[in-house]
Each structure stands twice: as structure tokens, then as C-alpha cells.
Amino acid sequence: MVRIWAKIMTENKLQKDIIYEAAGIYNPAEFYLHVQEICHKMDIPSPVVLKTHVHNYTVFNTCLFLSRDFVESVSFEKLILENAQE
């Protein structure tokens, strides 16, 4: 099971968070699909996902999207995704 803790932060304060769950095992090739679903559930635009983001999540279990990673303007500073596996 894939479990990702998604957090929206502004001025180092938590604005909103969710735990995203998907069936199956984590596959780096499907990371963008997980990000899309997380953003849909949080009602925010999807960021541009680069190889660096996938690598950071796969290797370090965390990934950071800054406001500049979004094509549309957003009202927060960062979106942080963390592996929430038990």
C-alpha cells in the first residue's frame, strides 16, 4: 500500500494536510499519478513533477514542491510529501 502524508505550509505553519492511500506497492514511474490525486483531493493545482522530485521521494522518503513548481498561482509556499508507511 502507498501512504503519503501531504502538507501545505505557509510561513512554516501547517495550513492543511491529508493522508493519501492507494492500493499496491510504490512504483516511481507512477509517482506523478499519486501527486495528481493528492492535489485533486486537496483542491489545489498539480505541480510540475521533475525527476528530482521523484528521486528525492524514492531515496529520502520526502519531496518538496515550492510555489514556483506550479504553473498556476497558489496561495501557499510549499507542498511537502512524506512517505507515511507504517
Image (tube, rainbow, N blue to C red):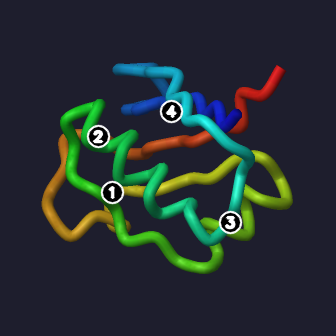
Reading the chain from its start, which is encountered first: label 4 or label 2? 4
Residue type for callout 2: Phe
Q: In the image, which is nearer the foreground, mark 4 or mark 1? A: 4
Tag of residue 76: 2
Residue type for callout 1: Ser
- Which residue is identified by label 3? 28
Question: Please, what secondary structure does the residue beneath circle 3 have?
Answer: helix
Q: Position of residue 72 (x, y in %)?
A: 14, 63
- Which residue is identified by label 4? 6
- Which residue is identified by label 1? 67
Callouts 4 and 3 close, C-beta under 8 Å? no
Residue type for callout 4: Ala
**Picture residue at 19% right of the left edge, 35% below the top:** 43
Tag of residue 54: none
Reading the chain from its start, which is encountered first: label 2 or label 3? 3
Question: Please, what secondary structure does the residue beneath circle 4 have?
Answer: strand
Callouts 1 and 2 close, C-beta under 8 Å? yes
Residue type for callout 3: Pro
Callouts 4 and 2 close, C-beta under 8 Å? no
Reading the chain from its start, which is encountered first: label 3 or label 1? 3
Numbered circles on residues, count: 4
In the displayed structure, does residue 34 sit left or right of residue 76? right
Callouts 4 and 1 close, C-beta under 8 Å? no
In the displayed structure, does residue 79 sit left or right of residue 85? left
Cα–Cα gap, marks 4 and 3: 17 Å
Q: Is residue 71 above or below residue 22?
A: below
In the displayed structure, does residue 52 sit left or right of residue 79? right
Q: In the image, which is nearer the foreground, mark 2 or mark 3? A: 3
Cα–Cα gap, marks 3 and 1: 23 Å
